[in-house]
């Protein structure tokens, strides 16, 4: 499994790339960037930056969290809907760990 990370050496992820990943993963559009927060968990003691976007085009959610997962050879942007069961950036990070 890839580790969640805020930054990867020599790789920068833009808000546009986050938006594109949300579109490709969930087939919905990002309307606006809401905020980013740094999250630390026991599994990820180094801060992970989690971005929250307002979305449209999906009947299950109006917001989506996104963060970067970095492996040795690959970078992935994780995108999970904000919902009643998943309503904080910390829960978004934890949900990636479970997958």
Image (cartoon, rainbow, N blue to C red):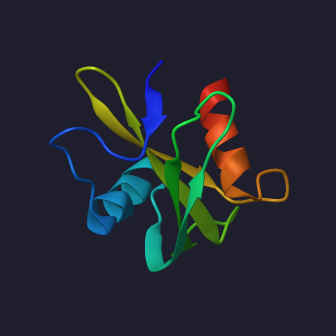
Instruction: Name the residue at 37% across, 64% down.
Output: 19
Does residue 82 appear to the left or right of 38 in the view shown? Answer: right
- In this view, the residue farthest toward the left is 10
Number of numbered discs: 0
Does residue 8 appear to the left or right of 1 in the view shown? Answer: left
The image position of residue 27, as x and y in percent, is: 45, 57
Q: In this rendering, does residue 56 appear at all?
A: no
Does residue 7 appear to the left or right of 22 in the view shown? Answer: left
- In this view, the residue farthest toward the right is 84
Residue 88 picture quarter: bottom right
- Residue placed most toward the observer, 44 or 2: 44
- Residue placed most toward the observer, 53 or 13: 13
Residue 34 against residue 19 in the figure, above or below: below
Residue 60 against residue 56 in the figure, above or below: above
The image position of residue 83, as x and y in percent, is: 76, 59
Residue 9 picture quarter: top left
The image position of residue 74, as x and y in percent, is: 26, 27
Instruction: Name the residue at 62% across, 69% down.
Output: 63
Quadrant that contains the C terminus: top right
- Residue placed most toward the observer, 44 or 3: 44
- Residue placed most toward the observer, 57 or 5: 5
The image position of residue 25, as x and y in percent, is: 44, 48
Residue 16 against residue 99 in the figure, above or below: below
Residue 83 against residue 6 in the figure, above or below: below
Q: In this rendering, does residue 73 appear at all?
A: yes
Does residue 98 appear to the left or right of 22 in the view shown? Answer: right
Instruction: Name the residue at 28% across, 39% down.
Output: 8
């Amino acid at each position: 499994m890839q580790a969640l990370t805020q930054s990867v050496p020599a790789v920068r992820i833009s808000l546009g790339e986050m938006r594109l990943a949300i579109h490709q993963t969930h087939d919905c559009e990002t309307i606006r960037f809401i905020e980013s927060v740094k999250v630390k968990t026991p599994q990820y003691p180094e801060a992970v930056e989690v971005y929250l976007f307002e979305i449209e085009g999906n009947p299950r959610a109006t917001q989506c969290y996104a963060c970067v997962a970095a492996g040795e050879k690959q970078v992935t942007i994780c995108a999970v809907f904000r919902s009643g069961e998943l309503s904080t950036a910390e829960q978004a990070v934890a949900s990636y760990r479970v997958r």
